[in-house]
Amino acid sequence: MSESASTPPRPPEPRARSAGPAAIEVSHLTKTFGARTAVDDVSFSVARGEVFGFLGPNGAGKTTTVRILGTLIAPTAGSAVVAGLPLGPASAAEIRQRISIMPEAPGLYRRLTVTENLEYFARLYGLPRREQRITEALAAVGLADRAYDLTGNLSKGLWQRAALARTLLNDPSVMFLDEPTSGLDPVAAHEVHVLITALRGRGVTIFLTTHRLDEAERLCDRVAIMNTKLRTIGRPDELRQTLFNRSLAVSIAAPLAHPGQVFAGLDWRVASDQPASSADSRPASYLLTVTDPAQAAPAVTRALVAAGADVLSIAESRHTLEDVYLELVQDTEGGAR
Amino acid sequence: MSVSATRIGAVIRKELAEFQRNRFIVVTASIVPILFLVSPTAQILSLKATVLSTVLRKRVETGLFLPLLIPVLVPSILAAYAVVGEREQGTLEPVLTTPITRVEFLLGKAAAIFLPAIGVSYLMFGVFVAITQFAAASPVATAVLHAPQLPAALIFIPLLAAWAIWAGLAISARATDTRVAQQLGTLASLPPVAVAALMSFNVISPTFTVAAVMAGVLLAVDVLACFAVAQLFDREGLITGTKSTGGSYRVRGAS
């Protein structure tokens, strides 16, 4: 990782996903624990080589879904295909051979060195050329110089890296990463992002569970937002467009005396915490709902200038993935209440 | 159901490496055997050549019985930690995401405990017998060497250890706390010791036939216990802390 750490992760560019069967195909998956439903009739598919973000609040069923797809627990109902194999007892061992899972808790043996930990897992996978695989995995996460340190002596960030190295050992076609940057400082988190981007470049399918919406937006081709049920799924920009109208954010030197006249024919509102009185000399901001921001901006600018306003800025207002998330999750929780 | 020797070997290697670096385990595995060696050895060495035959017999019985507690207590402590300990430190889930089967996992754990446990037990027995032969009065040394309990004890050491391991693993697979698991594991490992005690103290005459039958029964129980523990090892329950509801992964041993 150290070698490529200076290269920032690529922004999420729409990329052609691999043709052929999906890496993960989930159909009406349900899991109950007694009377509690953890995952409720969830269906989605993840293409090969895709970075798929799986978002949701605590208790939304994200980890349960990962555990089902990782063959750790059995679904109550529904079916799934993982790494080309149908989920079930007959194929569970083979699926585990083809995938890797990094749980939220890194789960390393403190009394063993980093290499001993990896050696153990390499043997459990029955890997040939173990030494070479371990060396490559350690190099990929920038941990080669700590290979013979006791794991218990490592910092949390290095633990996370060692756990990531473990998930690379078996050269998986599908990786499930559960909160891989949880508790990491920004530099360490950035390095994990770089690694995920590199894995994506190698065609590895990554199923990323995260609470960090900026991380999901930056890394993921598509995201699913879940709250026991699947709330939505799509590319971050698609979700923004689906949920929110496009708008122009206008900032001017002082509030308009008659904004309704200036913005005639447009749906507009004063941006929050802004002065509304024209007597106020502080800058004011307005949000205008438009069909096409690029087309509307010149006309709005002309109208503002004609009204004597000093325009400070005018730009498309971009909703973040966080806006999408909050809209969907709060809607669900509000409905539940 | 195929069993991978590589994966079992991996678990054994890892466990032994961890044991060596775990101070609690090293201290426990050292103090318990020494305690059960020092006491009977001291009792035997205190006997004079003119000791009454009834006193001699009782001391020899006790002397040969106490070391039998070593293959019970040492593995029960280690086995009780084996599963719940991994669960507590968060290492169980990553292991179960690999292709290892529960049978391989349990056999690896059991073997890693069994090998050092019987090694220490035989070593302590050997030391006990050697000391009595070199340092005890002549009639006392002869009585120890020719006691019928001696070969019986040698047969019972691995069988008792196996029972203690499976009982400990069974409890560890179901327990939520290491200390509780260790306490229950020690208790659960004691019943077969009662059989050994009955023979050691001549309540059941320790003839070869009786010892062989008892050993056969204990061996059968050990084998059955192995399968029973594999059934108790509920992958889903261990990870989620709930009872398996899906069931399909639990039924097949290969998973």
Image (spheres, coloured by chain):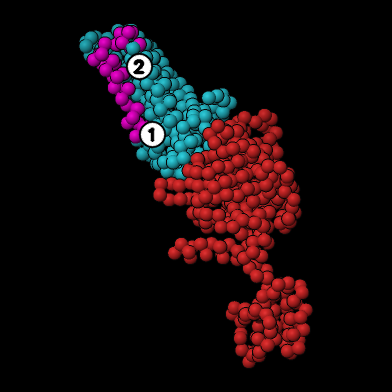
Chain colours: A red, B cyan
* CA–CA distance in space, label 1 to label 2: 22 Å
Q: Assess whether mark 2 and mark 1 are in contact (beta carbons under 8 angstroms).
A: no
Could you say which quadrant of the image residue A24 lies in? Answer: top right
Please report the residue visible at 52 percent of the width from the left and 65 percent of the height from the top.
Answer: A331
Is A198 in front, or is A12? A12
Q: Residues within 10 Å of mark 1 (few under 14, many from 20)?
A: many
Quarter of the image that includes the C terminus of chain A: bottom left
Q: Position of residue B88 (x, y in %)?
A: 46, 42
Q: Residues within 10 Å of mark 2 (few under 14, many from 20)?
A: few
Q: Position of residue B155 (x, y in %)?
A: 39, 14
Residue A114 visible from this viewpoint: no
Is B175 in front, or is B30? B175
Q: Position of residue A335 (x, y in %)?
A: 48, 64
Could you say which quadrant of the image residue B130 lies in? Answer: top left
Q: Secondary structure at mark 1?
A: helix
Asked if residue B198 lies in the magenta stretch, the reply is yes
Q: Secondary structure at mark 2?
A: helix
The stretch of residues the image draws in magenta is B184-212
Total numbered labels placed on residues in the image: 2
Q: Position of residue B132 (x, y in %)?
A: 35, 14
**Position of A47 relative to A280 (above/below):** above
Please report the residue visible at 64 percent of the width from the left and 39 percent of the height from the top.
Answer: A83
Q: Main secondary structure of the magenta part?
A: helix
User: Amino acid type of disc 1?
Assistant: Ile
Mark 1 sits on what residue? B171
Asked if residue A161 lies in the magenta stretch, the reply is no
